[in-house]
Structures are given as structure tokens and as C-alpha cells.
Image: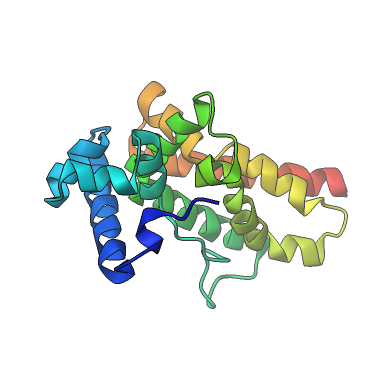
Amino acid sequence: MAVPYEATGRTGQKSRTRQALVEATRELLGDGLSPQVEDAAARAGISRTTAYRYFPNQRSLLLAAHPQISPDTLLGDDAPDEPFARLDACLAAFTEYNFAWEPQLRTSLRLSLEPGGRTPAERPALRQGRAIGWIEDGLRPVRARHPGVDVRALAVAIRSATGIETLVWLVDIAGQTREEAARTVRGTARALLEAALRAAT
């Protein structure tokens, strides 16, 4: 098995160089660009030859720039316990997360639609389903109080209608502002919860 370049020799320096390239890529994405490896190298003040030792192509660079934040929950210890209020707080935090990382998430969305990249290492984090767990956490009171509701299936349904894909459509196609789009996805989540509770009674 090949050893990554940054895992050999002066690993501390190499880790800093890699991180500088990742941060430069995130800055360029934030500027609305779709950077190549040489663009990130120029922004970071690193030679192209060195940059290609870390990232052999644009895809590997863009995947590395995807947010790696994976908390177990988006909610604090003071999150409400009432089902609708907790879900709304979860969706507010989820939408804020999506907009905070919008350039990177848009890039990951594009990468997820391209052919190839089907091994776990090549798959954007967008495709790994972590948001479903966040929404399940937002639905915790439902699991406890309404055993007839399939919380996993409900979380999948809510995720399908509230993630970055939906926000991109609402903003780019429907012409909503980001504030309007945030209200739309929160309203959709509430409607799906209401429907699930009605069906379970």
C-alpha cells in the first residue's frame, strides 16, 4: 500500500503545508471559484510541484476542502424537549451550517454527481449521511413519546427536503433569499413531522 507523501519525513511541516493548501482552497471556493491545484498553490504561496505532491488532481483537493466537522449533534444541552421546538432548533442549526459551508458543500454536491469517485475515500462527505443522524437527534422526543413513528424514515424524509441540495434549488431556481429558504425548509420539516404524527395515531 502506498504511503501518503505527508505521512513520511518531516510530518509536522508537511501537515502544515497540506493545511495551508486546504485553507487556500476554501478561500477560493468562498470567492466563487472552482480552484485547480495550481490556484491553491498560488494562493498559499507554495510551489506547484509541492502542491501536486499532496493533491494529484482537482478532485482530491476539493474533497479535502470539504468541511470535516462531524459533531454528534447540532444542538446544545439547553435544546428544547418539545418535539416541534426541538426539530425547529435542529433545522435552524442545520441550515446555518449549510450556509456557513455553502461554497464547499456546493462543490461536494457537484463532485457527487460526477462519474467515478465511488470508493469511500473518494466519496464526498456530502454522500455519507451524517445529517440524518443530526435530524434523528432533533427528533429524539418523538422517539420517546410516539413509538408508532419510524424516526429513522422520518429523518431521511426531512433530510431529503432540507439539505444543501434543497437550499441550492430554493435560492438559485426559486429565487428565494437565504432567509426565505431557511424558513421554507423549517416549515417543510414541521409539516413532515405533523404528517408522521397524524399517521401514527
Q: How is the image coloured?
A: rainbow
Looking at the rendered structure, the number of numbered marks drawn on it comes to 0
**Left or right of residue 16: residue 131:** right
Q: Is residue 192 left or right of residue 28?
A: right
The residue lying toward the viewer, choosing from 150 and 43, is 43
Q: Is residue 128 above or below residue 181?
A: below
* Residue 144 picture location, percent across and down: 79, 67
| Residue 1 visible in the picture | yes
Residue at position x 20%, y 37% in the image: 38
Name the foreground residue: 70 vs 140: 70
Give residue 157's position: percent from left, percent from top: 68, 40
Question: Residue 104 at what x, y percent from top left?
Answer: 36, 43
Front-most of residues 42 and 112: 42
* Rendered position, 73 above or below 101: below
The image shows residue 8 at horizontal and vertical percentages of 38, 63
Tell which of 83 and 110 is nearer to you.
110
